[in-house]
Amino acid sequence: MAEARDVHALDLARLAPWLRDHVPGADGAIAAEKFAGGQSNPTYLLSVDGSPRFVLRRKPDGVLLPSAHAVEREYRVTDALKDTAVPVARPLALCEDSGIVGTPFFVMDYAQGRNFWDARLPELTAAERGAVYDEMNRVLAALHAIDPADVGLFDYGRPGNYFARQTARWTKQYRATETQPIEAMERLISWLPANDPGLEASRIVHGDYRNDNMIFAADEPRIVAVLDWELSTLGHPLADLAQHVMAWRVPKEGYRGLSDADLPALGIPAEADYVRRYGERSGVGEIDPAHWRYALVFAMFRNAGIRQGVYRRAIDGNASSEAAAIHGARAGEIAGLAWRIACGEEDARL
């Protein structure tokens, strides 16, 4: 019986010559290893003559939703930010030819350091945890302080009216990947447009800013690179902050969150303190509680839509992780939490 083909394996016979022609320092023997985890764009560590040197990130196989998995946009935004106060893995080359590895991809430097998968940071002391969270807060404020026009990203997304446009977009994405009715999603699809506060600020937003999408220095609480810019665009900073702070609203089991953690004992700031520090750093000051509630509800609605898409790709057989079906099936739980917060239950938990 023929051995089953690894659907995520790279064709090194095609890739190696392309790398030699486009990436300085890639002229030795190439080996590739797919990173574990992740639900979206397959990502690989490339070694040259046995030494880790580069990272390749490509679109998944199969039929994709319009504008989804846009590695071209990831390349563009990291290239724009590479010399700013926001640390990124320096992008090196973009390939839009699907004939090399099957889908478009780009290559970036390998950022060495620590990656914290668990938001509770169990490997650190309480003081170290507090420093790591303060660094995440600082870098997010630094990202939102950048004028998109100053780094050539004035047209990276449509300015203004972000929440309305994104609600419409994720409603459409959810409909395209719907597998069964989710009552809370139906309610949110009506609630979000009806309660839109009309916030107009427009900055570069990461879209999935969380601890496991960062590389920290090996010996200090300093971010070496913010990774996974697939969902980045021009948008409202509160949406980005709310997506990040979702970790405080969900539990450890199934979500790697903090809602059931003893934060003071861990040295991790409470949600209100973290948001307040961001307001001080970013210059926005105290955030209107109604605006914060709306941003949280929107972020959770969007997250549920993303999870539904992951789940659908798992059903269709082209998700980049075997855990996709498990994570995607939680779309209804996140939507339910969002609806409870929308109804005024500020302390709602899963």
Image (cartoon, helix red, strand yellow):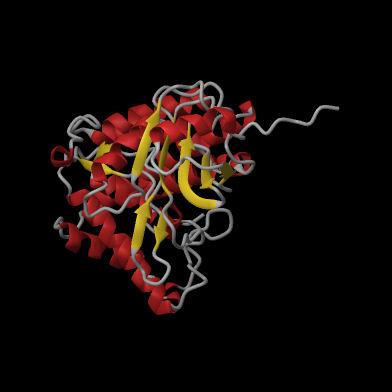
Q: Is residue 258 above or below residue 204?
A: below
Residue 167: x, y in percent?
A: 34, 32
Q: Toward the viewer: 251 or 256?
A: 256
Q: Is residue 184 visible?
A: no
Q: Quadrant of residue 319?
A: top right
Relative to 226, 150 lies left or right: left
In the rendered image, the residue lying farthest to the right is 1
Residue 234 locus on image (x, y percent): 24, 37
**Which image quarter is the N terminus in?**
top right
Q: Position of residue 182 (x, y in %)?
A: 53, 34
Q: Is residue 156 left or right of residue 312?
A: left
Residue under the image location 35 percent in, 42 percent down: 91
Q: Is residue 250 above or below residue 18?
A: below
Res 276 → quadrant: bottom left
Residue 238 coordinates in the image, percent (x, y): 26, 48
Up the image or down, 67 lies above or below 91; here it is above
State the residue lying farthest toward the front: 28
Mark yes or no: residue 245 visible: yes
Q: Nearer the viewer, residue 13 or 73?
A: 13
Would residue 237 be found to the left or right of residue 221 on screen?
Answer: left
Quadrant of the rendered image containing residue 312: top right
Tell me: residue 199, above or below residue 52.
above
Numbered label tally? 0
Nearest the viewer among 337 and 331 is 331
Nearest to the observer: residue 346 or residue 120: 120
